[in-house]
């Protein structure tokens, strides 16, 4: 599994993808950092992303958008709001692959599965 996205702005140089290691851990590559996390941590990050998407950006007292900050052990990732949609999408796709959403959807759509609409 290797979920990868690039920023809509090709000059920004934002690198963001998730890869799965043969040891079973996930490696989150964001900008110049690589963070190794387990399945539960990946799910927690997705949950935090979904919560942030619902709330919208947090603002400081001057009205500027604060970055999305997530602590992973001793590592802290700080994702600026303009890159948050990219980061959240990559994490969501990695979780979807991890839990097999595409395979489940394909099985449910198969004739004779008893789940057709």
Image: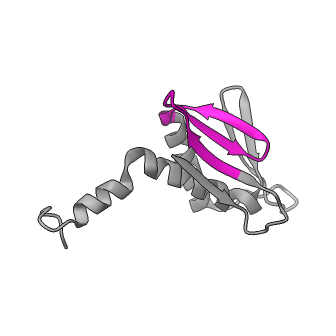
**Within the image, what quadrant is residue 54 found in?**
bottom right
Magenta-highlighted residues? 16-40
Residue 18 horizontal/vertical position (percent): 60, 45
- Using the image as rendered, state which of residue 45 and residue 57 is in the foreground: 45
**Within the image, what quadrant is residue 77 found in?**
top right
- The colouring scheme, among rainbow, by chain, secondary structure or one colour, is one colour
**Residue 40 against residue 69 in the figure, above or below:** above
Residue 51 shows up from this direction:
no
Report the residue that reaches farthest toward the bottom.
117
Residue 115 shows up from this direction:
yes
Q: Is residue 23 left or right of residue 17?
A: left
- Using the image as rendered, state which of residue 51 and residue 114 is in the foreground: 114
Q: Is residue 114 left or right of residue 68?
A: left
Q: Is residue 62 magenta?
A: no
Instruction: Give the residue at x 78% y 68%.
Output: 9
**Residue 36 against residue 98 in the figure, above or below:** above
Examine the residues drawn in magenta and state their main secondary structure.
strand
Instruction: Give the residue at x 33% y 55%.
Output: 103
């Amino acid at each position: 599994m290797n979920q990868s996205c690039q920023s809509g702005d090709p000059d920004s140089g934002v690198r963001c993808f998730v890869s799965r290691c043969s040891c079973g851990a996930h490696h989150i590559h964001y900008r110049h950092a690589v963070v190794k996390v387990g399945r539960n941590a990946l799910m927690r990050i997705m949950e935090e992303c979904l919560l942030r998407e619902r709330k919208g950006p947090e603002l400081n007292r001057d009205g500027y958008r604060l970055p999305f900050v997530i602590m992973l052990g001793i590592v802290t990732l700080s994702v600026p709001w303009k890159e948050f949609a990219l980061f959240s999408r990559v994490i969501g796709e990695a979780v979807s692959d991890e839990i097999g959403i595409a395979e489940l959807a394909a099985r449910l759509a198969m004739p004779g599965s008893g789940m057709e609409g």
